[in-house]
Image (cartoon, rainbow, N blue to C red):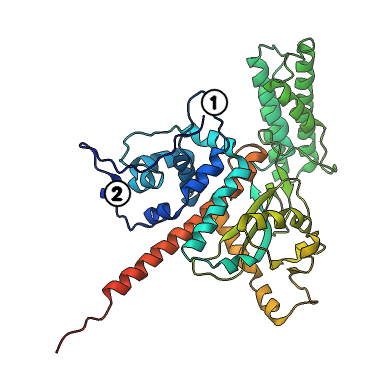
C-alpha cells in the first residue's frame, strides 16, 4: 500500500496552535522546507510501495526529512528521535502542522526505510539538493559542468584487526552459539583462551615475537578444536542448520583459521562485518584503513553557496581509481543533468578508462600535454576537494559507518553527501536572510529640509 502523503490543509485546532504560528517563518530550515520539491521525492520513493492491502508506510516527507536532518546535523537514530520530539523546527521540516508531544514513528522505522529505499533511490535526495542549490542561486547551472573527483576510504565500525583477537573472538562466538543451540562441547577453552590472548598481547608489546607466535599457535589450536567438535556434533543435522547463525559463523571461523598473513586474495578482518576491506592510501599516520573505497565528486568553481558534492558512490573490491570513471561519469551526468566538460583528478587516475567521448576531458595532476593556462589554473584547485572529504567524515557520519553490509556502505556514503549539501544550503539561506535584513534596516533615510 502506498504511503498517505501529508498536505497542509490549513486547519486549526481549538486546543493546539499551529506550528507556523509559533516558529519563526524566516528560519533557514523553514525556508529550506518550502524550497524542496517534496512531490518529486514522493514520486521517487513511492515507487517502492505497491497498492496491496496492509498498513500504509509512513509519509515520504516525514522519513525523507528525518534522513536529511540525521546526516545534516550528525545525529544517531536515538538522538534524532529525541531532538525531533523537542524541536518544533524539525517537526515543521518533516511536514507536521501541530506540535507533537509523542513520536509519530518508531526508531526502527528509520532503519527499515533506509533498507527499503537503497542507494539507487536515496540518490534522489542528492539530486534534489543540487536542484535546490540551483533554485536558490547557491550555484549556477554552469558550475556543474566542471568537476573534481577523488577517492577516499569510508571506515567501518570495526576494531583494528589482529590475528590473535580474531581467533579468540571467533572461538567465543562459536561457544555461545553452540550453547544456544543445545550442543554440549567437550571444552570451551574460556579461561585458557583468555590467558593465551593476554600472553600474545604482552609478548608482542615487548617485541618478543617467538613467544608471541607460540601463544598465537595456541589460540589457533583452541579454535580448531572447537570447530571440529561442533562439526562432529551437528553431523546429521547439517542440512537443518545450513541457514542458521551457527552455520554461518562456522564458515567464518574456518576462514579465520585458514587465512595466512601474506596470502593473496580477500581476507577476513571482522566477524560481524565480513565485507570490510583493507585499503592503503599511502598516509603516514594511517597506513591501512578498514572499510570501503568511496568516490567523491565536487564542483570546481567556488560558488556563492560553497562547494557542493555532485556525486558519491561506494566502490567495493578496492578498484584502481582510474578504472572507476567508466561507471562514475555516466551516473554523474544522469544525476546533474549536464554534460561534463572537464574533469580534474589526481595522479591516481592516470591510465583511466573513461568513456571514449571523455578521453580528452579528464586532466590529472602533473599532466603536461593539452594543458592550457586556464586548465593549469584549474588544476591548482584540484586539492579543494580534500576539505570537502574532511567535512564529510568529521561532520556528516562518513568517518565511521555504523550501517550493516555493503548496502549500508553505499547508503551511508550517499546520505553523508546529502547532509553536507543541505548543511551548505542552510548556511547559504541564513546568509541570504541576513543580507536582506541588512539592506532593509541599513537603508539611508531621507530627511526633508
| Callout 1: SS | loop
Furthest residue toward bottom: 449
- Between marks 2 and 1, how big is the CA–CA gap? 35 Å
Q: Name the spot of residue 140 as percent of width and height, x first.
A: 54, 68
Q: Name the spot of residue 66 as percent of width and height, x first.
A: 46, 43
Which residue is label 1 attached to?
Answer: 52
At x 66% / y 20%, what residue is drawn?
177
Q: Nearer the viewer, residue 121 or 372?
A: 121
Whether residue 400 appears in this view of the structure is no
Q: Name the spot of residue 95 as percent of width and height, x first.
A: 39, 43
Q: Residues within 10 Å of mark 2 (few under 14, many from 20)?
A: some
Furthest residue toward top: 236
Q: Nearer the viewer, residue 394 or 41?
A: 41
Q: Is label 2 in contact with label 1 (beta carbons under 8 Å)?
A: no
Q: Is residue 253 above or below residue 204?
A: above
Q: Is residue 359 above or below residue 230?
A: below
> Quadrant of the image for the C terminus?
bottom left
Q: Name the spot of residue 74 as percent of width and height, x first.
A: 49, 49
At x 67% / y 63%, what residue is drawn?
339
| Callout 2: SS | helix
At x 64% / y 57%, what residue is drawn?
296
Question: In the image, which disc is placed on residue 342?
Answer: none
At x 35% / y 43%, what residue is drawn?
8
Which residue is label 2 attached to?
Answer: 20
Amino acid at each position: 500500500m502506498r504511503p498517505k502523503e501529508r498536505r497542509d490543509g490549513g486547519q486549526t485546532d481549538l486546543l493546539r496552535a499551529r506550528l507556523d504560528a509559533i516558529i519563526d517563518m524566516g528560519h533557514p530550515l523553514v525556508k529550506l522546507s518550502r524550497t524542496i520539491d517534496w512531490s518529486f521525492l514522493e514520486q521517487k520513493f513511492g515507487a517502492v510501495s505497491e497498492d496491496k492491502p496492509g498498513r500504509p508506510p509512513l509519509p515520504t516527507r516525514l522519513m525523507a526529512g528525518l534522513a536529511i536532518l540525521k546526516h545534516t546535523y550528525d545525529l544517531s537514530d536515538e538522538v534524532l528521535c529525541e531532538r525531533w520530539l523537542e524541536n518544533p523546527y524539525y517537526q515543521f521540516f518533516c511536514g507536521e502542522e501541530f506540535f507533537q508531544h509523542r513520536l509519530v514513528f518508531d526508531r526502527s522505522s528509520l532503519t527499515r526505510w533506509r533498507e527499503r529505499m537503497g542507494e539507487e533511490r536515496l540518490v534522489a535526495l542528492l539530486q534534489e539538493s543540487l536542484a535546490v542549490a540551483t533554485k536558490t542561486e547557491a550555484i549556477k547551472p554552469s558550475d556543474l559542468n566542471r568537476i573534481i573527483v577523488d577517492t577516499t576510504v569510508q571506515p567501518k565500525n570495526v576494531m583494528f584487526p589482529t590475528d590473535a583477537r580474531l581467533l579468540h573472538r571467533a572461538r567465543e562466538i562459536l561457544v555461545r552459539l553452540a550453547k544456544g543451540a543445545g550442543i554440549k562441547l567437550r571444552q570451551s577453552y574460556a579461561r585458557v583462551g583468555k590467558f593465551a590472548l593476554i600472553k600474545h598481547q604482552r609478548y608482542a608489546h615487548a617485541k618478543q615475537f617467538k613467544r608471541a607466535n607460540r601463544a598465537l599457535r595456541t589460540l589457533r589450536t583452541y579454535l580448531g578444536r572447537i570447530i571440529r567438535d561442533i562439526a562432529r556434533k551437528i553431523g546429521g543435522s547439517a542440512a537443518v542448520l545450513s541457514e542458521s547463525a551457527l552455520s554461518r559463523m562456522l564458515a567464518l571461523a574456518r576462514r579465520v583459521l585458514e587465512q595466512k598473513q601474506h596470502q593473496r586474495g580477500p581476507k577476513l578482518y571482522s566477524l560481524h562485518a565480513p565485507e570490510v576491506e583493507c585499503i592503503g592510501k599511502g598516509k603516514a599516520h594511517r597506513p591501512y584503513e578498514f572499510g570501503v573505497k568511496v568516490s567523491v565528486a565536487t564542483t570546481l568553481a567556488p560558488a556563492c553557496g560553497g562547494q557542493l558534492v555532485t556525486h558519491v558512490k561506494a566502490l567495493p573490491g578496492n578498484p584502481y581509481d582510474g578504472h572507476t570513471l567508466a561507471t562514475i561519469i555516466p551516473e554523474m551526468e544522469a544525476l546533474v543533468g549536464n554534460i561534463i566538460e572537464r574533469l580534474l583528478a589526481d595522479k591516481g587516475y592516470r591510465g583511466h578508462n573513461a568513456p571514449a567521448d571523455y578521453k580528452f576531458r579528464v586532466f590529472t595532476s602533473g599532466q603536461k600535454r593539452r594543458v592550457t593556462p586556464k586548465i593549469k589554473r584549474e588544476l591548482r584547485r584540484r586539492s579543494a576537494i580534500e576539505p570537502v572529504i574532511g567535512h564529510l567524515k568529521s561532520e556528516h557520519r562518513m568517518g565511521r559507518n555504523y550501517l550493516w553490509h555493503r548496502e549500508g556502505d553505499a547508503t551511508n556514503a550517499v546520505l553523508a553527501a546529502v547532509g553536507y549539501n543541505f548543511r551548505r544550503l542552510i548556511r547559504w539561506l541564513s546568509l541570504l536572510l541576513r543580507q536582506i535584513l541588512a539592506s532593509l534596516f541599513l537603508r539611508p533615510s531621507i530627511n526633508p529640509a
